[in-house]
Amino acid sequence: MKLTNVFEPVRIKGRILAKNVATGEIASKGLIRDTQLRTAERNKEVCIVSASGRVTRIPAMEMGVVVKDAPKPKMSFLNVKSKADPSIMFSNIERLTKMVGKGIQPSLVITGSAGTGKTHLVKTTLTDMGLRESYEFVHFKGRATAAGLFVTLYENSDKIIILDDCDSVFKDADAVNILKGALDSYDTRSISYLTTKPLKDEFGSHLPRTFEFTGRIIFISNIAQSSLDEAIRSRSFVADVDLTKQQMFTRVEQLMDKMESIIPMPAKAQALSIMRELEAEFDGVHINLRSFIKAARICAMGFEDPKMMIAEQIIEA
């Protein structure tokens, strides 16, 4: 049989097309339907087109045609992350925090779900390394302007600075430009704030317009990583703990014996069980460490109907 009317399925930029085995030309659209090509690709077949336009599939080996295996679809990284063990995820964040603490890495960005213990983990890790808050590291929480960021970096130029929920800096072009200088991988980094009106410190003294920054920065935020400026992402290690509901339940299970030490374990177990019931029955249930603490405290008090009490505290109105 001549090969001039024989076509093999090929992938070009993700699209499935028909290539003439004899000439190598790509067939015109519509000559062979996509469904037929996909079936031929899966079964390692070629398509023969008759003069009337009828398409017949036969094994490629019978025509002496070697058909490449269909490319395997790429995995979704989000699907992989959704099945990850939270204890491993947070253990990795602890290691990344230690890298910042030891000066190996100048910055770390931790994003993800609220109430997962991100801040507690970072501060505990630094403290366990022998670093003291207000001396070797400082913690700031809330809104920050570009000018405020410059002053903060100047006053703590040799410390580890934790910027917690300071999401406004990511939306301010001037603040982002300041951070670009602070996050470069050099031993000393020059940071400038050029303005006609000099900035002042808390004592009213004028600050220099340029200074050398030798510190490190850890960002903690609930915003999505996709909202981060690419320049900040590229200069930092990033860690995301946007946990699924099941991962959050697992996280609670892993930590509940260490949380609220004055509450008996039976009360904690009851609280977790009620939270699972509420999640199965209602929309808008907040599943995180904070909501678990509320539930555990309610169960510890021996209310007659703790389920409704907990529901009022952890379900969106």
Image (tube, rainbow, N blue to C red):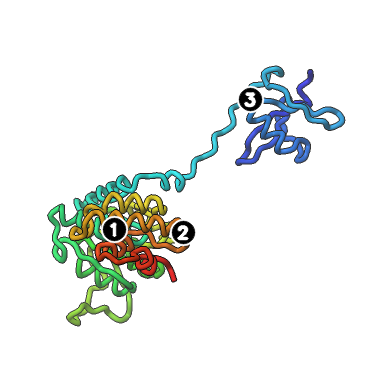
Quarter occupied by residue 73: top right
Q: Total marks drawn?
A: 3
Query: Looking at the image, is mark 3 or mark 1 nearer the viewer?
Result: 1
Spatial separation of the CA atoms under disc 3 and disc 2: 52 Å
Residue type indicated by callout 3: Val
Residue type indicated by callout 2: Glu
Across and down, in percent, residue 143 comes to: 33, 73
Specify few, some or many for label 1: CA neighbours under 10 Å numbering under 14, 14-19, or 20 or more: some
Decide if residue 128 is on the left or right side of residue 223: left
Spatial separation of the CA atoms under disc 2 and disc 1: 26 Å
The circle on residue 117 is 1
Instruction: State whether residue 155 appears in this view.
Output: yes
Considering only order in the chain, which callout, 2 or 3, is on the residue closer to the N terminus?
A: 3
Q: Residue sitting at 36 percent across and 53 percent down?
A: 248
- Figure quadrant of the C terminus: bottom left
Q: Nearer the viewer, residue 10 or 248?
A: 248
Query: Looking at the image, is mark 2 or mark 1 nearer the viewer?
Result: 2
Across and down, in percent, residue 156 comes to: 20, 66
Decide if residue 167 is on the left or right side of residue 133: right
Mark 3 lies on a secondary structure that is loop
Specify few, some or many for label 3: CA neighbours under 10 Å numbering under 14, 14-19, or 20 or more: some
Mark 1 lies on a secondary structure that is loop
Residue type indicated by callout 1: Gly
Considering only order in the chain, which callout, 1 or 2, is on the residue closer to the N terminus?
A: 1
The circle on residue 67 is 3
